[in-house]
Image (cartoon, rainbow, N blue to C red):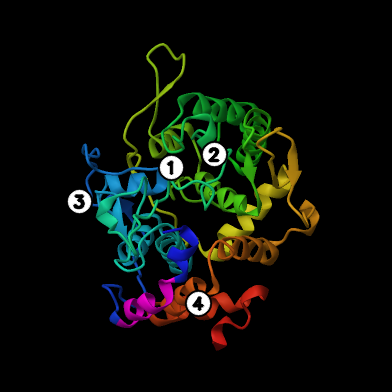
Amino acid sequence: MSRMNYCCVLTITLIFIISSNIGVCSTKHKYSIGRIPDAKHPFRPPGATDVRGPCPGLNTAANHGYINRSGIVGIDEVVKGLTTMYNIGEDLAVILAVTNTFFLGNPETGKFSIGHSSDETGAFMGIIPGGLNEHNTLELDASLTRNDYDLANGDNWSFNGTLYGMMHEVAKETSNGLYTIEAIAAYRRKRYQQSRRDNKKFFFDVRALHSYGAATFLYEVFPSAVDKIPSEEVISSFFGAQRLWDHSGWMHKPERIPYNWYRRLEPYTLDDIIQQAVAMYRIRPVEFGWNIASSGQFFPSPGFLSSDELDGDTAFCLLAESVIALAPTNITAAQNIYIKTHYPLVYQGLAKYSCLQQLAST
């Protein structure tokens, strides 16, 4: 069955799913500020069958059991895990969990893989979902520390020590070794230029704004609330980066929460990540688009906006509309109904964005 046909048959099945409330509670999660991890969430390296993927934040959460250690996760556990461990705002946690489930996971079981496709999510209409590794859905080229899909025989999830070393050097040159917004903006553009030059199938449309949002975690979420410093010690722990004995490079070890670490004091909300992603992009703007595979020639995205025209509302709507375009209207409608049913306050809050102003009244 083709992906489009797969999406088109969702409506009837999802109506059943939404009405059955598959283990997802509507209670808003609230937690006190404190030291993380607690005694119930010790570090444990992933086992041979556990799934890990391209997102250091989710890998770390799984290694401490804030989400299922198997790497096959459900919507509510992701919402609870991200709010508990990182003090991610419920609105952002819901958007991340629901979008990953509906577009990269199995809406019927309510599960998605934080890495490669897995039978553990269950097949939906005969297809095993691709998980977070699925290329050119939300995972695009020019990742901070992962290879481009077409430059590594499809391995777009493994830690690349050379790329981490590049990021480390840019941080040293830009911000005295700290992973600040200026350092990450500079490194994002460097990776963009590298991938656009070397990858004939380079793809970096407006969905890459998601990558900018994810990169803000380095200086907004990963630093301890005690000092809020995005230091090498902190970032390397979350990325699972370890210096080689002779300092000639970097190797990977399981991601873990740094010693004596405290989650951020204020929730990191959807508004926060959008504003920070736009701010990062505007420091070192690049052109959205893709390379034509046959020639490697770059083709700019139609209607490209200059950095001065990109604000939070525009960025959110560009990203939302580009993701929605991947599937028929019915899957988007089902996702909206799901959020409205189980997270009504989050649903109402989405109406502030111009492209979704009618959402709360539907």
Q: Secondary structure at mark 4?
A: helix
Mark 1 sits on what residue? 54
User: 359 or 57, which lies in front?
Assistant: 359
Seen from the viewer's position, the closer of residues 171 and 194 is 194
Q: Could you say whether the residue bearing mark 3 is in a helix, strand or loop?
A: loop
Give the distance between the C-alpha atoms of the residues marked 1 and 2, in whole angstroms.
Answer: 9 Å
Q: Which of these two is toward me, 358 or 91?
A: 358
Residue 143 badge = 2
What residue lies at 33% left-to-right and 76% top-to-bottom?
A: 17
Mark positioned earlier in the residue sequence (4 or 3): 3
Left of 217 or right of it: where is 237?
left
Residue 216 placed where, x, y %? 55, 49
Q: Is residue 60 visible?
A: yes
Which numbered mark, 2 or 4, is in the foreground of this view?
A: 4
Query: Reading the chain from its start, which is encountered first: label 1 or label 3?
Result: 3
Q: Which residue is mark 3?
A: 39
Q: Is residue 11 magenta?
A: yes
Q: Are marks 2 and 4 in contact (CB under 8 Å)?
A: no
Q: Is there CB contact under 8 Å for labels 1 and 3?
A: no
